C-alpha cells in the first residue's frame, strides 16, 4: 500500500468561508477468498527487491478542507511507485482523498540470533527522500506509516521468544519512525518462514509484547495491523488491553469483505473492505465502499496505488464514501 505535489490550494481558497466537516473515520478487514500482499509482491522484498496552509491577506487563516466518512488508507509499493503520488488526489472540496499513506515495506531480518529491521534500496530511498516523498504529504495532513513484514529468514512479529526480544525490535522500529519523522508503523505477519535458521515457531504472547512495547515507545503514533498470519490468530483471542493499543486493523484479502476480530477494536477502527487498486475490479471497489458505509466501518483500505492518474478508479469509491469525486493534480 507516489508522487507528491501540492493539491487542494485552490479548493481551500474556495472553501475558506465554509464550515469544515468532521474528520474522516476508518474501514478494512481479512477474508481467505482474496489475495493478500504476498501474491506477486511481498515475497520479493526479502531478496532486496520489494520490500498549513497559507494565510489570507488580512482576513485570518484559510479553512482547511475536510471530509466526513471512513479513514482511507493507501499502501504504496515503493519498489515500483512513488509514495508522494498519494498526495495528488483531492476531493471536489479540496480535502485529501487518502488519509494515511503506507510505505510498503521494510523487512524483519534475522541477524546474530535476533530480529533486525532492514530496508531495501527502494524503501531506504523513500525514507532518505523524506523532503519530497513524506513531508509534502504530512503538510497536507496525510499520515505516513512504514509497513514491516518478514524476510524469509525465520524472524517475524509472531515469534519473539521473550518480552525483552520484542522490546528490542520495538526500539528499532520507534528509532526509525523518529529518525525519518514518520507517523507510525504497520505490522504485517507475512513472509517470515518461521523455523528457518533455527528460529522458534510462533507463540501466543509475541504480538502482544510487540504492540505493548511499540505503544510505550511511540505514544501518539499510529500502530496498524494487517490482519493475517499467526499474529492474527493470537490477537483474535488476546486481551482487549492489547487490541486497544492498536489504531487500526484491516482485512488483508483483496476484493473481499470481512472485518478483523480483535478484542479492544470496534468497527470505527476496522476495515472490512480490501481493495487492490491495480487488480480489484472497479465494480467490486464500489460494492465494498457501499457495504463499508452501510455497515458503519470507520476505515477503507486500499493497496497498490500506482503512478499516473487513477482518478476515475479512486472516484468510484470516494463518491460512495464521501459524496465527492477525486481529481489528480
Image (cartoon, helix red, strand yellow):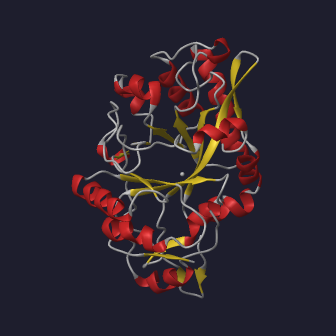
State the image coordinates of residue 217 (x, y, percent, origin top left).
Answer: 60, 32
User: Is residue 139 in sight in this rendering?
Assistant: no
| In-front residue for pair 315/38 | 38
In this rendering, would 207 be left or right of 146? Answer: left
Residue at the (45%, 24%) spot, across then down:
230
In this rendering, the answer to whether 173 lies above or below 273 is: above
- Tell me what residue is drawn at x 59 percent, y 27 percent: 192
* Residue closest to the eye, 10 or 126: 126
Is 186 above or below relative to 128?
above
Q: Is residue 276 visible?
A: yes
Q: Residue 135 at x, y = what percent?
A: 67, 61
Q: Quadrant of the C terminus?
A: bottom right
* Front residue of 318 and 65: 318
Percent of width and height locating residue 194: 57, 20
Residue at coordinates 39% horizontally, 25% vertically from top-left? 233
Looking at the image, residue 185 lies above or below residue 134: above
- Give x and y (percent) for residue 136: 65, 65
Count up the numbered dots. Answer: 0
Q: Is residue 105 left or right of residue 220?
A: right
Amino acid at each position: 500500500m507516489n508522487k507528491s505535489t501540492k493539491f487542494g490550494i485552490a479548493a481551500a481558497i474556495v472553501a475558506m468561508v465554509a464550515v469544515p466537516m468532521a474528520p474522516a473515520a476508518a474501514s478494512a478487514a481479512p477474508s481467505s477468498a482474496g489475495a493478500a500482499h504476498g501474491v506477486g509482491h511481498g515475497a520479493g522484498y526479502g531478496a532486496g527487491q520489494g520490500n498549513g496552509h497559507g494565510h489570507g491577506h488580512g482576513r485570518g487563516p484559510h479553512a482547511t478542507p475536510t471530509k466526513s466518512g471512513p479513514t482511507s488508507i493507501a499502501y504504496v509499493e515503493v519498489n515500483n511507485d512513488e509514495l508522494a503520488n498519494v498526495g495528488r488526489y483531492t476531493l471536489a472540496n479540496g480535502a485529501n482523498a487518502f488519509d494515511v499513506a503506507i510505505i510498503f515495506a521494510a523487512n524483519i531480518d534475522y541477524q546474530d540470533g535476533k530480529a533486525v529491521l532492514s530496508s531495501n534500496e527502494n524503501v531506504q530511498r523513500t525514507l532518505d527522500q523524506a523532503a519530497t516523498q513524506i513531508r509534502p504529504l504530512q503538510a497536507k495532513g496525510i499520515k505516513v506509516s512504514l509497513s514491516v513484514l518478514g524476510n524469509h529468514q525465520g524472524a517475524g512479529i509472531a515469534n519473539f521468544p521473550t518480552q525483552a526480544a520484542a522490546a528490542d525490535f520495538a526500539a528499532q522500529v520507534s528509532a526509525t519512525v523518529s529518525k525519518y519523522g514518520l507517523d507510525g508503523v504497520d505490522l504485517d505477519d507475512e513472509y517470515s518462514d518461521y523455523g528457518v535458521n533455527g528460529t522458534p515457531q510462533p507463540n501466543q504472547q509475541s504480538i502482544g509484547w510487540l504492540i505493548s512495547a511499540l505503544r510505550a515507545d511511540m505514544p501518539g503514533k499510529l500502530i496498524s495491523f494487517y490482519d493475517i498470519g499467526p499474529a492474527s490468530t493470537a490477537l483474535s483471542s488476546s486481551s482487549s488491553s492489547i487490541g486497544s493499543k492498536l489504531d487500526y486493523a484491516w482485512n488483508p484479502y483483496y476484493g473481499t469483505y470481512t472485518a478483523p476480530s480483535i478484542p479492544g477494536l470496534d468497527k470505527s477502527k476496522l476495515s472490512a473492505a480490501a481493495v487492490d487498486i491495480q487488480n480489484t475490479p472497479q465494480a467490486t471497489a464500489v460494492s465494498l465502499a457501499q457495504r463499508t458505509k452501510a455497515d458503519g466501518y470507520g476505515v477503507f483500505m486500499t493497496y497498490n496505488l500506482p503512478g499516473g492518474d487513477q482518478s476515475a478508479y479512486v472516484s468510484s469509491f470516494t463518491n460512495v464514501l464521501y459524496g465527492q469525486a477525486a481529481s489528480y493534480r
